[in-house]
């Protein structure tokens, strides 16, 4: 069994592959104050919860929180005494990165780009809707040529609630109308329909550069909430990052 772990600013998601199949994913909170042993206990508990207590042969980590990835790496080595890769310099990905400074490309963007190349035609655009919303562009040669970074849906909603006196924290669940008739519906319209319109608009602009036949993929925790309200054709692939992690792991063993 191979562990694939994505460390985000808000959540850390643990996945496990066996015989090239994803067995499960589990979400825990990303906590910069947790110790190595606390992360070891969390991983052990997740595996037990999903009845996946079999032998762990190796692991790979993608992280945008460096101090947490180090704790996780040591925790996994302590638990299973196995090889652990952390996506970054020195790890083979097979991705041709054409941005100004390839070392600046986040590990999460590397992983979704690698998976998009394996699973979808090029050129392609990948939206990752998490704490931040990121867009990655792959040209017709399969080269990662750049992208965009926007405030995430939940991050923007939290900023509204914290930065204003009368706007509450809201949930994205529930009916969504373009024109809201009360404060909560208006906020939900802005968060859901507004972000869907943003995605549609960015797709049109990216296609002007990449070509009209560009494939569009969306992943991340909020993709399933936003994409149904988009007008452009978008494929939701919730496991994209984990498939990328697993592919990178196999390139390095």
Image (cartoon, rainbow, N blue to C red):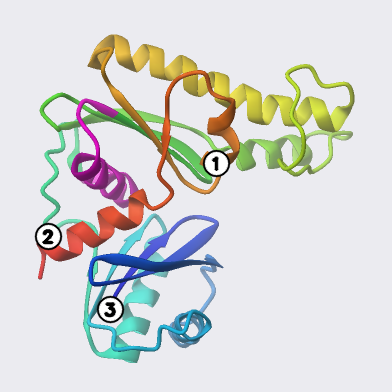
Task: State which tag comes first along the sequence, 3 or 1.
Answer: 3
Q: Name the residue under label 3.
A: 1
Question: Circle 3 — which element?
Answer: loop
Lower position in the chain sequence, tag 2 or tag 1 = 2
In this rendering, the label closer to the viewer, 2 or 1: 1
| Image mark for residue 66 | none
- Residue 121, magenta (yes or no): yes
Residue 224, disc: 1
Q: How far apart are marks 3 and 2 (CA)?
A: 23 Å
Residue depicted at x 84% and y 33%? 184
Task: Tell me the distance, in whole angstroms, between the alpha carbons under discs 2 and 1.
Answer: 34 Å
The front one of 150 and 191 is 191
Q: Identify the residue shown where x is 47% and y is 15%.
A: 201
Quadrant containing the C terminus in the rendered view: bottom left
**Residue 15 falls inside the magenta stretch:** no
Q: In this view, does 17 lie above or below 226?
A: below
Residue 90: which disc?
A: 2
Report the magenta residues as a range: 103-124
| 230 shown above or below 169 | above
Residue at 37% x, 66% y is 5
Q: What secondary structure is the stretch in magenta mostly built from?
A: helix
Sequence order check, earlier mark of 3 and 2: 3
Most foreground residue, 237 or 202: 237
166 vs 199, nearest the viewer: 199
């Amino acid at each position: 069994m191979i562990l694939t772990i994505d460390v985000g600013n808000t959540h850390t998601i643990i996945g496990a592959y066996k015989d090239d199949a994803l067995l499960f994913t589990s979400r825990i909170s990303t906590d910069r104050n947790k110790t190595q042993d606390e992360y070891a206990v969390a991983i052990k508990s997740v595996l037990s919860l999903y009845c996946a207590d079999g032998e762990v042969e190796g692991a790979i980590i993608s992280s945008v929180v460096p101090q947490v990835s180090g704790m996780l790496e040591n925790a996994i080595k302590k638990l299973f005494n196995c090889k652990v890769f952390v996506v970054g310099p020195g790890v083979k990905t097979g991705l041709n990165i054409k941005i100004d400074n390839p070392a600046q490309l986040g590990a999460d963007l590397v992983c979704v780009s690698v998976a998009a190349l394996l699973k979808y035609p090029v050129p392609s655009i990948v939206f990752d809707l998490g704490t931040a919303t990121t867009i990655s562009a792959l040209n017709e040669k399969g080269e990662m040529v750049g992208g965009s970074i926007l405030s995430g849906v939940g991050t923007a909603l939290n900023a509204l609630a914290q930065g204003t006196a009368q706007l509450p924290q809201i949930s994205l669940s529930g009916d969504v109308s373009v024109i809201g008739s009360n404060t909560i519906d208006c906020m939900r319209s802005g968060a859901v329909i507004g972000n869907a319109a943003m995605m549609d608009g960015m797709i049109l602009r990216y296609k002007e550069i990449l070509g009209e036949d560009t494939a569009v993929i969306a992943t991340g925790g909020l993709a399933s909430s936003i994409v149904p309200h988009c007008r452009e054709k978008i494929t939701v692939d919730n496991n994209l990052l984990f498939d990328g992690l697993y592919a990178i792991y196999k390139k390095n063993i």
